[in-house]
Amino acid sequence: MFKERFENFFEKQHEINYRPETMYQMLKNFAIRNENSIAYEFQGKKTKYLEFLDRIEVVAKGLTAIGIRENDVVTICMPNCPQAVDTFYAINRIGAVANMIHPLSAQSEITFYLNLSKSRVILTLDQFYEKVVEARRDCSHQVIILMAHISDELPFYLKPLYKIKAESKYSHLPNRSYSLDWNKFISMGENYPLPLPKNVFKIDKCSVILYSGGTTGSTKGIMLTDLNFNALSMQAVKAMDVKVAPGDSILAAMPLFHGFGLGIGIHTCLTNGAYCSLIPSFTVKTYGKTLLDKKPNFIAGVPTLFEAMLRTPGMDKADLSFLKGMYSGGDSLSIELKAKVDKFLKEHKATIQICEGYGTTECVTASCLTPKNRYKEGSIGLPFSDTTFVICPIGEINHLPPNQEGEICLSGPTVMLGYLNDEEETAKVLKIHEDGKLYLHTGDLGFIDEEGFIYFKQRIKRMIITSGYNVYPSQIENIIDGHPKVQYSCVIGVKDPYKIQRVKAFCVLKPGIIPDDSIKNEIKEYCAKHIAKYACPREFEFRDELPKTLVGKVAYRILEQEEEEKNAEYVAMRSELKTETKKSAKKTKKKGM
């Protein structure tokens, strides 16, 4: 389907002139022209494009030396750090496939990702090594583990401190016959005797696998191509309508395994000259300090990140005039939060407003953006170049007129190849419409106004977004229900001032088991072993029974409504208390007079 659709893609007329090249080729073409500019920075250590290309070549030779060839899958299970970025482009350099996964994934999840992708190699850090070893035990095929150390990429003045902290923990690793230390691996690449094969662009080839829930809420491997990422790079810069030049920088805090982090924070920036300040992790307390230390020209993140910025101590007198662009994605940016952020930016000497993008991992990430000089309240913006948005009745392919609500569907060069090993699910979301184009059915409700501005209303598919990460309740419920003392469960997202939503689980225990703190802790520990940290429920509530629908399913919407009412009562109570406090203060003031 994809091959037929793009067979003559490069001969057709488009707003943008796309080139038939791989991600590595696009990067290399830019790097050769700007070899002395900075490509990325990590903990103060800067790497120029010329050195970056050399590093990619060595890693590519190392992968070739251990037997990786075209179309083989290599998993990157890493935070944002130089080894991960080098390896991503080295994989592309030799025509292999990069399988991107969260390093905080649970052991069983890592096994699933390795088996689904048939990954031959997994790159991880020393701190995740033992978990990966355990995950490998249940793999259906042989997997080589490459283990890297953050200390190898630190500037010389930080290395001793890290080594003191990590020496006792990781000095004996790796300790398996199927594992390879990063430095030894690099040595193999440096000593590889043959030149690498020519990097050839193939339009119908999967180059990257990212993960999302698909339409059913079960984990799906999303197959993305070089064209998907390269088109995004060119479209995004045009939509931003801001000059990006060598020497500009972006705070690359969004993770590599996320479409937003990889597509915008890494590839778009590296192929347009904004160097990446790689941030492996951050907290509310450290984010503001990092922002002021790095002084990036661009920030891309989820609403949670901008909420953190507003609440960060020490930002009162901050001068943010260095900002050229701020972009929110991964979740809806509320009208209230946008107003707060824009006010904050103005008060701190920034001449910009925050812009909101919208997209799904099935089209890498953003596919539309609010214009920098025109905001329509509640809108998620206008489509990227060569991207068409339409609204259809749910499950249908006919297009609705302006201002009618339905499913958001989009067509363009960033739309995925399909779901890995799942043609049935692929057919549900990729459909040819009445205009002859192939559209991605997003599973989101919205409408388009008469000027072409797009509005997002809510998700059709049941999904929780916490701190920008997708969490699928049915998966969490399946794991909780596997606990020997749980009869059944229901997981919902509840409002959270920082995370936007936090995960809450309602549990009905098996007959005869009385709920108490020890049972709660037991289930929490069980979840920690089987569920990624970001997806673990933060709250557990035990009930004798959960509300049901007429057909006997758990009525999760009733539970959501109950939580909303609780939240509304709490807000009303706070408001009443604040009013009473003000009245009391006025009375006291009058008495004093």
Image (spheres, rainbow, N blue to C red):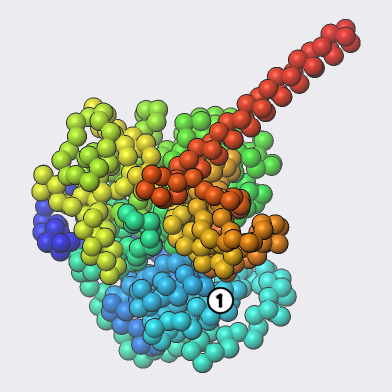
Q: Position of residue 87 (x, y in %)?
A: 42, 73
* Left or right: 305 as drawn, with respect to 22: right
For mark 1, what is the residue?
A: 131
Quadrant of the frame with the N terminus: bottom left
* Picture quadrant of residue 306: top right
Is residue 187 at least partly visible in the picture?
A: no
Q: Residue extending furthest front?
A: 512
Could you tell me which residue is drawn at 53 percent across and 60 percent down? 487
Q: Position of residue 539 (x, y in %)?
A: 61, 51
Could you tell me which residue is drawn at 16 percent across and 48 percent down? 14
Sort mark 1 into few (<14), some (14-19) or many (20+) by Cα contacts within 10 Å: some
Quadrant of the frame with the C terminus: top right
Q: Is residue 21 above or below residue 573?
A: below
* Left or right: 291 as drawn, with respect to 400: right
- Amino acid type at mark 1: Lys
* Left or right: 442 as drawn, with respect to 569: left
Is residue 575 at least partly visible in the picture?
A: yes
Q: Position of residue 329 (x, y in %)?
A: 43, 45
Q: Nearer the viewer, residue 80 or 308?
A: 308
* Left or right: 16 as drawn, with respect to 178: left
Q: Nearer the viewer, residue 64 or 382?
A: 382
